[in-house]
Image (cartoon, grey):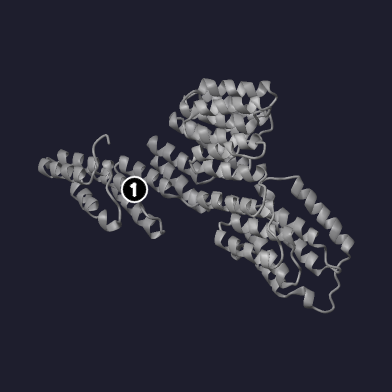
Amino acid sequence: MRRSISSKAKSFLHRNPLLEKGNNPPPFAIFDSRFSRRREAYSNGGGSDDYREKLDDSLELFFHMVQSRPLPSISDFSRLLTAISKLKSYDVVIYLWEQMQTLGIAHNLYTCNILLNCLCRCSQLSLALSFLGKMMKLGHSPSVVTFGSLLNGFCRGGKVHEALSLFGKMVEIGFRPNVVIYNIVIDGLCKNKQVDKALDFFNRMEVRPDVVTYNSLISGLCSSGRWGDATRMVRCMSERGISPDVFTFNALIDACVKRGSLLEAEQLYEEMIRRSLVPDIVTYSLLINGLCMYSRLDEAEQMFDYMVSKRCFPDVVTYSILINGFCKSRKVDYGMKLFCEMSQRGVVRNVVTYTILIQGYCQAGKLNVAEEIFRRMVVSGVSPNIVTYNVLLHGLCDNGKVEKALVMLEDMEKSGMDADIVTYNIIIRGMCKAGEVADAWDLYCSLNLKGLMPDIWTYTTMMLGLYKKGLRREADALFRKMKEDGIFPNG
């Protein structure tokens, strides 16, 4: 975690300026005005471009604070640590917290809660629990905020059973959970596909649920394909005087798009407008995705332009969705235009964006362009994932370039990327298609040594290759082996 702290920060902190003589720190008033300016910067938000600047400003401010005489109050340090944690620089917060302790700055419950939250956010749950014990030894009794951070950490880490256990202990020692605590547990249960437990937990709530409670349940029900229960939950919240918000509508629109009910999704969007709710980037991205799925690309483009006119600027997800729509409709050059537009608008392309475009050009038979995009991706510092490699390997094999695909497979493994069964299915299929059935068979036989289990596609591809070569007996033997392995056609 500490590797991300700049060397400048480390050298400064390790000098321990509080112990140096002849220190002539600026007056406290200067600190206060600088802190105010920084605080305004945080509240004004900003895109990814100014993240580094904000973090550098935070470190500079911390350096200034620890040199000031008198030292700023612990509440001033708390505000700075909170601001840095809002930048999601949790490792930086942990490092600075430890340095404060080294410099003799006494922590309070608030700063302890900040550290515990950052440990949970970094998935350091065992350290967080150890720190809870340390907090209590130092005389800081845990608060609802303390338990909230731990519960959130457990839920985010998929440890819902532990979260429920902690909730029970919290109640046992006399804490009365508020709606935020209930919401954390309900959301964790829903995201871990335990919707029935979440509903049971909801029915036992001892405080009034709010819109966040209902949104978690509605999203969970939609994700589980329980559309009827989700709409009943919407009626229930309305009957209790809680109005659906943008998040509620987004969950419902997402479910409609996934169900193929684009008309319902559009009606929900219109209902949002009637209720004077302002659609956000998620709303627009979901609708654009739905329109692309039905090849309604003109309308998808219009929606894209409309969201920009409303000063709701598309992000990498929105761009990737629309690029994918064009590529699927064999309009890959339109996708490339959007791809180029992203850099002009300051939107950073990710592995998904590159992979979509590479696949588009492979399917269009323009392998040279696909390979060039792959090279540009690597040069740009975006690491290809297994899907990227599989897409390009598929393109190469489909176009008869099996030897090139094998070289790429070798390069992929040298880079530390483990090939999966999909990768080998692509290569085996390419070899069989090129008439290199013996090589395909050798590769198939090596799968067990690589720790991979053949699937239905492996067997089907290999059997077809053998049949085409007239090796009917070997193909029949492979079919029997497939059934022995518990894999059945259309199973």
- Crowd around label 1: few <14 · some 14–19 · many ≥20 (10 Å): some
Q: Quadrant of the N terminus?
A: bottom right
Where, quadrant-wise, is the C terminus in this rendering?
Answer: top left
x and y percentages locating residue 226 in the rendered image: 48, 30
- Relative image position of residue 348 (x, y in whole percent): 58, 45
Task: Give the camera-side residue of 128 and 461.
Answer: 128
Query: Where is residue 463 drawn, in percent x and y?
Result: 19, 41
Quick check: can you spot residue 340? Answer: no
Disc 1, SS: helix
Horizontal arrangement in the rendering, residue 27 relative to residue 444 (left or right): right
Q: On the picture, is 58 further left or further right than 73?
A: left
Residue extending furthest toward the bottom: 21
In the rendered view, tell whether residue 204 sits above or below residue 375.
Answer: above
The image shows residue 450 at horizontal and vertical percentages of 29, 57
Vertical comparison of 403 with 204: above or below: below
Label 1 sits on residue:
423
Q: Nearer the viewer, residue 16 or 472?
A: 16
Task: Please name the residue shown 67% across and 20% down the image.
Answer: 274
Q: Is residue 199 left or right of residue 118?
A: left
Q: Relative to 51, is 95 above or below?
A: below
* Amino acid bearing label 1: Thr
